[in-house]
Image: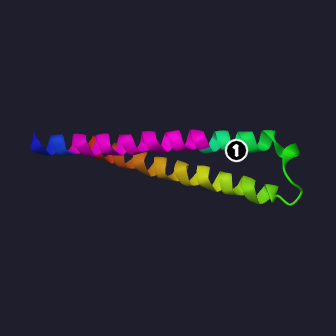
Amino acid sequence: KQKENVMTEKIKLLQGIKQKLEGERVCVSNELEIFLDNLQTLPDHTHVVKTIEEYLDKITNINDKIQVLDFMVKSYDTN
């Protein structure tokens, strides 16, 4: 029973982190959309490709973390 409670707490913690990351992903995705929608208003010196890649790197990093969390939760669920 004690071990089961510890596992449940671990899973809840990991799921909470996942929800936080999913929220961050939505924010970054929205920022990218806004950036893309306003390309015409950017100064000529703006590094558009570099900025887009930075947003994509952030989203990729978040997705990688979510994937690891899903793996961890699944491994705790099967024990």
Q: Is residue 52 left or right of residue 12?
A: right
Q: Is residue 17 magenta?
A: yes
Q: Decide whether residue 3 is among the magenta residues.
A: no
User: Based on the displayed image, in which of its 4 quarters is residue 46 positioned?
Assistant: bottom right
Q: Residue at x 24, y 42 (%)?
A: 9
Q: Residue at x 10, y 43 (%)?
A: 2
Q: Residue at x 47, y 47 (%)?
A: 66
Label 1: element kind: helix
Q: Can see residue 79?
A: no
Above-or-below relation of 4 to 55: above
Answer whether residue 64 is visible to the viewer in this image: yes
**Residue 47 picture location, percent across and down:** 81, 59
Q: Is residue 64 left or right of residue 73?
A: right
The x, y position of residue 22, in whole percent, is: 50, 40
Q: Which residue is mark 1?
A: 32
Which quarter of the rendering shows the C terminus? top left
Q: Is residue 37 left or right of residue 30?
A: right
Question: Mark 1 packing: few (<14 Cα in 10 Å), some, or many (20+)?
Answer: some
Q: What's the residue at 30%, 42% (across, down)?
A: 11
Residue 16 at x, y = what percent?
Answer: 37, 41
Quadrant position of the N terminus in the picture = top left
Residue type of the residue flagged with mark 1: Leu
Q: Which residues are magenta?
A: 7-27
Q: How many marks?
A: 1
Q: How is the image coloured?
A: rainbow
Where residue 37 appears, x then y in whole percent?
A: 79, 39
- Magenta region, mostly helix, strand or loop? helix
- Residue in the foreground of this view, choosing between 63 and 49: 49
